[in-house]
Amino acid sequence: MHFDLLIKNGDVIDGTGEARFRADVGVCGDRIEAVGDLSDSTAKAVIDATSKVVSPGFIDSHTHDDAYLLSHPDVLPKICQGVTTVIGGNCGISLAPLRSHAIPQPLDLLGLPSAFCFDTFAQYLDAVDENPAAVNLAALVGHSTLRVRHMKDLSRPANADEIAKMAADVEEALQAGAIGVSSGTFYPPAAAASTRELIEVFEPIRRNGGVFATHLRDETVDIIPSLEEAFEIGRAVRANVVLSHHKVAGKDNHGRSVETLKIIHKQSKLQPLCLDCHPYPATSTMLRADRIRQSSRVMLAWSTPHPELAGKDFADILPLYDGSVDAAIEDLKPAGAIYFVMDEADVQRIFSYERTMVGSDGLPNDTAPHPRLWGTFPRVLGHYSRELKLFPLEMAVRKMTGLTAEQFGLMGRGHIATGKYADLVIFDAERVLDRATFAAPTLRPEGIEHVIVNGVPVFQLGEFTGARPGRALRRRTADAI
Ligand SMILES: [Zn+2]
């Protein structure tokens, strides 16, 4: 046989969770054409993967890259980790559909107001195809974005007219190829939304299909009622529930992942659901007083009026405001921060759970970002799997490939098998490791050697190749998924 690309003699971890096996992988065009002993074959290009792992490209199940991949199509923080597909539109905040000059927090986590320039979801997905990135994008439509679009007063539940307009936008987005919806009632633009509002806005999911990804209303003392609300919404619209960045935040709640995982597992027998997590005990989002109170340490990630303070500990900034948290927030905002609110034991327990996927939740526009932006995937492979032996490498790979593809309905990806899309990573299992830290958050990881998207190398020898073969993956167009 003759291939466009032949990856020889690697240890294939295929994304199913099954044990690795020695094989060659032959690629023609954008697909995997053969897996097995291909030593009699020829190819235009050959990669020798001897003593390396060949795995499906990693799928980042939780990103805020919606605008970043248009402004930075190399998507370097992701390709250097082996990520080949990102899921955008999480936490209720999607870039589309919204055209606005004034965007409230946390929508600004996605980028500048000028980035919000799409009247429809179809326009956004077309823009991704017309200005392709190095990675694929599959996107959710966000409830907070729709509230900002259709409501003047965000401090109350939506009325019938506003719900009808938001539901029409959800219908348009799903028809255009959105893979589902997301909510973020934790955040001010959507905090006043009732459960009923969410169910009615997401009603088109019942007919069109798609997932419901949610940043829960509360991840602290009220974590259980918040989980139950998510389950109720998922059941009402018949959607697979994705519990975003599952955590139990605040010192008083440390250890409660025992309780939440028990509830989640029991519920998973009754309705489809899954969760994602990032491998750090700190989270990051807009600067807000409640999160500061819950945290043992806070670092400023960015501030529009005070960019010079990015990267500093909040405890060192506070004396500038005579110790007043409220005065500091008022002067620094809009701003974002990193919060040490979780317990490492909870993070590891959540990660070990069979339905937990890897999602970075990285914020690519931050001045001093959380290291998860550059380190998440190699950290799971190198630190959690190889060093801590939390789970076998095959399971670590599954949590970032096959499991994620199955949960989001990306059926052509996430596995190494004949006929699947050729999204592939070749890495050194002995060396792969994150290097980004809270003090130096943009250090590239080690051990990721080749990254291939739709059959085209995008990262090799530690550098972006310049190729941008990424696509907008549309749920309703099976061959593009
Ligand atoms: Zn979130």
Image (cartoon, grey):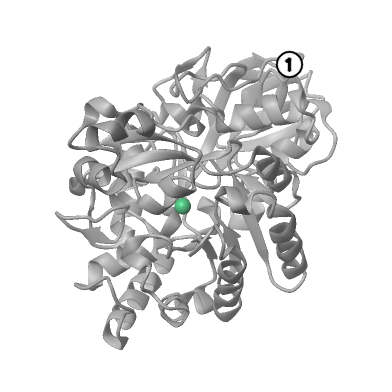
Q: Amino acid at mark 1?
A: Glu
Indicate the position of residue 279 as horizontal and vertical percent values: 61, 37
Q: Where residue 26 appears, x then y in whole percent?
A: 68, 28
Q: Position of residue 290 (x, y in %)?
A: 41, 53
Residue, disc 1:
430
Give the vertical position of 375 relative to 59 (above or below).
above
The quarter in which the N terminus is drawn is top right
Q: Residue at x 53, y 12 (%)?
A: 461
Mark 1 CB near ligand 1 (8 Å cut): no
* Residue located farthest toward the bottom when viewing the structure as drawn: 160
Q: Left or right? Give the position of 7 relative to 184.
A: right
Residue 297 in the image: state x and y as whole percent. Answer: 47, 35
Disc 1 crowd, CA 10 A, few/some/many (<14, 14-19, 20+): some
Query: Horizontally, is 336 left or right of 140 in the view?
Result: left
Q: From where the camera sits, is residue 220 visible?
A: yes
Question: What residue is at 56 percent from the left and 29 percent from the top?
Answer: 82
Q: Nearer the viewer, residue 38 or 320?
A: 320
| Residue at (49, 48) in percent of width and height | 294
